[in-house]
Amino acid sequence: MNTPEDIINLFELEQAARTKMGNQTAWDYYASGAMDEITLRENRQSYERIFLRPRMLVDVSQRDLSTKVLGQKVDMPILIAPTAFQKLAHADGELGTIKAANRCGTIMCLSTLATSSIEEVGAQADNNLWFQLYVYKDREITKDLVARAKAAGAKALVVTVDSPLLGRRERDIRNRFTLPKGLTVANLSKAGLENLPDDGSGNMPGNTKESGLAAYIASLYDESLTWKDLNWIAQLSDLPLLVKGILRADDAKRAIKCGAEGIIVSNHGGRQLDTAIPTISALAMIKDAVPKDFELFVDGGIRRGSDILKALALGARAVLIGRPVLWGLAVAGSEGVDLALNLLRKELDLSMALSGVSSLKEIKRDLLVDRKDLI
């Protein structure tokens, strides 16, 4: 497995990325979950407990993986999740990721904590950029970020609501994680908030035993954020609003009342509250509580095309992929992101054919059986 051409699945891509990155602190930042990493593991293992019940003798000679998200056509139901600090993986960073999204006919959601600015990424986007927003205590910063996202061509605003504080990521604490010299939070340079705490050489200052990112967030993010603030954010622009981080049906209903046009069912990749419910389990409960055509998305633990099939069967319009995109970047820059997305696309296509469905609209919950229901 010496070249990207040798890699045949995301698990091999992960191992190749770990070898390629070399930097253990950066790798741990991408790979780690909160505390005992139970939710991190369960996000993946929950998919493995769901079995498929395929239909036979169905004409699947022509298959269509395209769909619409917020009215926009995409070539596949696989979107790129917001992940911070992509230049830790490769110099291409977020610019490489948006170029891969263009080539693959899908949407990239850019993180507030990107190492490239919304303007830089927007200039390379093909009308396929969403912007993920963290809400700062200084509301003028929030207003400015929303206005800049709109001006840069973002097609939707994704508000993350599960991060009033950073989850306790013990690997980052042990490593005293901060950004290496030369990398910044590019979207916050205008506000003078582009740097995580460090001693000027890419290390945490003094003998402080903590994560630089945790210290940054604790000092700047708004812990008092409530539903009324979501109403305020929805009124800042005419961009469609998605809410990311919902795990409860009652919260989903509140988000809709606040103007959300979509919900991303997410536990932040297992990086916030450990033992929070796996996202695929939350998706099923939320789907039963929202209007039939309301757009739901899900992230976390998706590593196979069959996982995507299961998520769609449980009501997702599309899935978002985070860590695999970073692995692709680490291995081969922008082309590595292509590899990650296309591996999943091909596996989804095959899973559909073998399950007896030729288009996404034919994917129904009756394809699934939970392991506990098997004899």
Image (cartoon, rainbow, N blue to C red):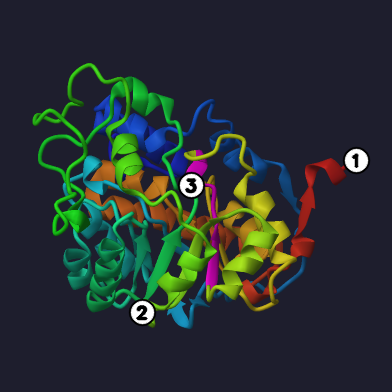
Q: Residue 28's spot in the image, x, y percent?
A: 35, 30
Q: Can residue 101 be seen in this view?
A: yes
- Disc 1 marks which residue? 375
Label 1 amino acid?
Ile
Residue mark closest to the camera, 3 vs 2 = 2
Please check the rendered image and state whether residue 262 is part of the magenta-colored stretch, yes or no: yes
Label 3 amino acid?
His
Q: Give the range drawn in magenta.
A: 261-270
Q: Can residue 17 be seen in this view?
A: no
Callout 1–callout 3 Cβ contact below 8 Å: no
| Quarter of the C terminus within the rendering | top right
Residue 271 in the image: above or below residue 175: below
- Disc 2 marks which residue? 237
Q: How crowded is mark 3: few (under 14 residues within 10 Å), some or many (20 or more)?
A: many
Mark 1 or mark 3: name the one nearer the start of the chain.
3
Question: Residue visible at 24% across and 33% down?
Answer: 178
